[in-house]
Image (cartoon, helix red, strand yellow):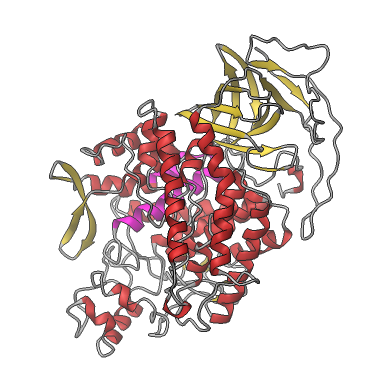
Amino acid sequence: MKCSVVPFCTVPMKKGESMLHASNPPRRKRALHVLVWTAALMCLGAPSRAAEVRPRTEPLPAIEIAEAGPPPEWALWERQLLDRLYPAALEFVRKYTREDGTLIWRDRWPGMDGSDDGYESFYNFPLYYALGGPEEMNSLSRRLWDAVTRQFTRYGQVHQEFDAYYDWMHHGEAYTNLYFFGLADPRDATFRDRSLRFAGLYLGEDPAAPNWDAARKLIRSPINGSRGPRFVNTAEDWVTHREVLADYPLPYDDIPNVRSSDAWIDDARFPFILEAMNRRMMRGDVPLNLTATSLVLNAYMYSGDPKYRQWIEDYVTAWTERMRANGGILPDNVGLEGKIGENMDGKWWGGYYGWRWPHGLFNQVESTLIGGANAYLVSGDPKYLELPRSVLEVVERQKRIARGRVVVPHRHGDDGWYDYRPIKPAHLAYLWYVSQDPRDERLLRTLTAGVPLGTLAYEKSKGDWEHAAAWLAFVAGRNPDYPLQILRATYAASLERLDVIRRDRSHPDEQDVHHWQERNPIVLEGLVQLMLGAPNHVYHGGLLHCRLFYFDPQRQRPGVPPDVAALVDRVTANGVSVQLVNLHPTEARTVIVQAGAFAEHRFTSIGQQHEKTDVEGPRFQVRLRPGAQGRLEIGMVRYTRQPTYARPWDDEQTRVD
């Protein structure tokens, strides 16, 4: 089997028109055919606010799937979600927003918390569009982002369209929404300009926000944003979080006049907590800030400017060197002079969102996983994954067995390691997925011993990626029923949230800032896993690292075309297997398959039914005849190309080299 190289087709086919060249009649007994066709290229008018792009003229390899048959059940369920989540989104938006898109809520909201929750309420709307959701989702997503920005600017949390100051767990939650707009449509000049300006806040380009110390390669405070580093927090800053933090351990055991966490809600004792945090935590860098690499990488994929890539590599390298200097243990605090434990009497623990407070291990794993994976994405060098791996290896050395399961310490304090609990499998699965390194597979097996990873026990939580380990079992050949299980489970979660919306009689003054995100009916974990061959993104600010991505060439937009379903059923270090189905009985469909969400991988071969052809590049086209379905065995080399938001028909040379 050989694959033709043909010019990219931008002209929609007429109903019933064949895309096969007359000199190459179809062979009915083969499901994968060679196509040779040419079509006129046309320059489409750019939408308002769009940056000008030139049409792409490089040819794409093209193949055909011809054998028809009844669609598999997973394909029907996948299209059900792609087509029916949109009315669910509309019901949600109509219930909780005004005509201008702002949230129907109170007139005043104090403190530094809140805008993240506003953005989170709609964070996956643009991703839904990018997978193949209705066209209207693109404009709706952008209108809601603008509305949240205006609303929380009035409240005081947002300044110059970016959060004035907060930590990067919450920034990460907020700006995942922003990153998906690049996947949805990178032509929007307003969002592109915002993305570059926001990244500049962390490259030292805004003198009003000196967050970055270029000489020491550190972000100068755990609390940062468009108003710069926040070295001194006030009671007003924490007013909305005090009651929540009363349920967590104290940040330190030696705070004067404080012996228990209920001091957070005691006006007489709370100032002592605040003073201790300001003195020890707020001047210098913490691993949590590694999540800012996603913001900078987002700018890089719009522009291609190497300064963003260099910043990411420099910053992740700086934290890797600190880890090595600390005997292989990630320190959770670095002072303004760049010294570990500078404000902690030399202790490497005790920093903001560090090994002790408030979440411990969770934040150290997640922030290094995001930073390490982002550096790998821009460099193609897996050495950056040493950073998250080191965190897991440290706690692995302290592991114990409790009730038949492995438990590891989640915190470290003056008396050493403590708070032994099972580790979250999703982080381990994600690291192995990205690295494909046997060391990370061993960590997954060792640290989850006693846990039935191949069985889906679905539970919707704040994030939408917690079932990565069960998905890994499926693509490894176990639990063939997983696609139906996860699609049914996520659809049920959407219906449950719609039921909560319909029964909600609460008044806006009674609603807390998490009210809407807890009701968002767009649940995408199953679609991302099955269509893209990847776990969904790390919730607190991660980007979408995946194997495959799709475009509709006739409508010139991201996502699978109408009636098309895709299932990645095998994933290896150097390839994937994907099933493609056209559910339409009388019309053909054409889909472009891309190697990664950002064209960061390179295809090497395409095959089906023991026939294989070599290819070279990040994309190819597939024409699906009416009712056709087939499996493609795709070879690829991962992380070999610079990531970009450029679409197949865009001229990548418009980016900065």
Query: From where the camera sits, is residue 437 visible?
Result: no
Splitting the image into 4 quarters, where does residue 653 fall?
Answer: top right
Q: Looking at the image, how many numbered discs can be counted on the residues?
A: 0
- Indicate the position of residue 463 as horizontal and vertical percent values: 42, 54
- Indicate the position of residue 473 as horizontal and vertical percent values: 36, 32
At x 68% / y 50%, what residue is drawn?
135
- Is 246 left, or right, of 290 in this rendering? left
* The stretch drawn in magenta includes residue 376: yes
* The stretch drawn in magenta includes residue 405: no
Q: What residue span does the magenta drawing correspond to?
A: 361-386
At x 83% / y 14%, what residue is drawn?
22
- Indicate the position of residue 242 as horizontal and vertical percent values: 33, 78
Q: Residue furthest bottom?
A: 268
Query: From where the camera sits, is residue 491 visible?
Result: yes
Is 276 above or below relative to 325? Answer: below
At x 67% / y 32%, what residue is drawn?
591
Is 608 above or below relative to 249? Answer: above
Seen from the viewer's position, the closer of residues 307 and 449 is 449
Splitting the image into 4 quarters, where does residue 417 fall?
Answer: bottom left
- Indicate the position of residue 345 as horizontal and vertical percent values: 26, 71
- Is 40 left, or right, of 219 in this rendering? right
In the rendered image, the quadrant that contains the N terminus is: top right
Seen from the viewer's position, the closer of residues 123 and 443 is 123
At x 65% / y 22%, what residue is drawn?
615
Q: Main secondary structure of the magenta part?
A: helix
Seen from the viewer's position, the closer of residues 351 and 74 is 74
Is 120 above or below relative to 575? Answer: below
Is 343 above or below relative to 371? Answer: below
